[in-house]
Image (tube, rainbow, N blue to C red):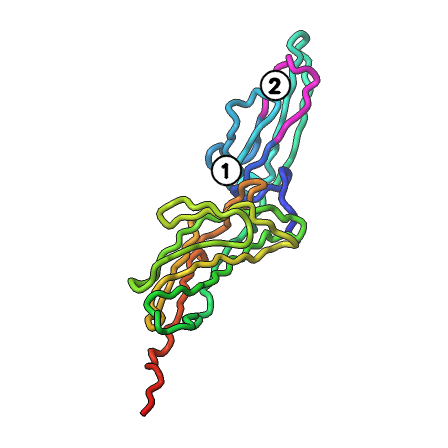
Amino acid sequence: MVMAQGGGNPLVNSTHGYKVIPGDSGNDFLWEITGGTEDVDYVVNSANLTGDSLNITWLSTTGNPYKLTFKETDTSTGCETSKELTLNVVANTFDVSISNPIATCNSANDTTDASNNFSIIDFTVNMTTGSSSWNPNWEITFNVASGNVSSTVDNVWSATGTLNDNGGGSYTLTDIPSSSLNNEITISVRLAGAAFTELSADVNITEAKELEYNTPDKDNDDWTAAGIINPIPNTSAIITD
């Protein structure tokens, strides 16, 4: 059974904060990490190890079990209190994927103006956390481009989350909610082009992460999709005698 991550069992590449409430803010503090190698198996993001809090990005399971130690020393007596936390980094289970939509027919209903037509392709993006008890908001950045010279990307939107246009065909969809282990969202791309010509669009995810601990997708081998709008027959008007 995969457990929801936290600072005691962080996922690979996730970032977590650790803190204490000191007995006296004027005392001396020191954090120590046992297990693994700094900048190889973990990265300390805090400016120093002498505050009452620490921020760490865990990079591998190599050092398991890691031990995090905090020491507070009374500056007047030299007496010391030490606190320890043993933790195990676990394999990343956060996964985002996109798949090719089923090809559809051009939606033109007035072929008298078939060269000036709009059709929509819906791309489905799936996310799973690997744990039914861990349901963070998440975010993806992706590129949208026309798949052939006959197609022009006219608009991009999603009914879920907040979409930001980064320019140059790049978009970020953020604050996407999740529930009960996974989620499925739709990215809609409207294409302009002739109804009698195949139209297509490509969507390529460039970054995906959950927003609670900034855990990135465990892989990127399922981040590209292509959608196709098939042309309708170029039938003439009805001819009479």
Crowding around mark 2 (Cα neighbors within 10 Å: few <14, some 14 to 19, many 20+) is many
Residue 53 placement, left or right of 240: right
The C terminus, quarter of image: bottom left
Numbered mark located on residue 29 in the image: 2
Residue farthest along the top direction in this orientation: 76
**Residue on which the image places disc 1:** 41
Residue at 68% across, 8% down? 77
Residue at 43% across, 46% down? 165
**Rendering quarter of residue 65:** top right
Part of the protein shown in magenta: 18-31
User: In the depicted view, which residue is nearer to us: 236 or 75?
Assistant: 236
**Nearest-to-viewer mark from 1 and 2:** 2
Relative vertical location of residue 36 with respect to residue 52 in this rendering, above or below: below
Residue 19 placement, left or right of 44: right
Crowding around mark 1 (Cα neighbors within 10 Å: few <14, some 14 to 19, many 20+) is some
27 is within the stretch colored magenta = yes
Numbered mark located on residue 109 in the image: none
The N terminus, quarter of image: bottom right
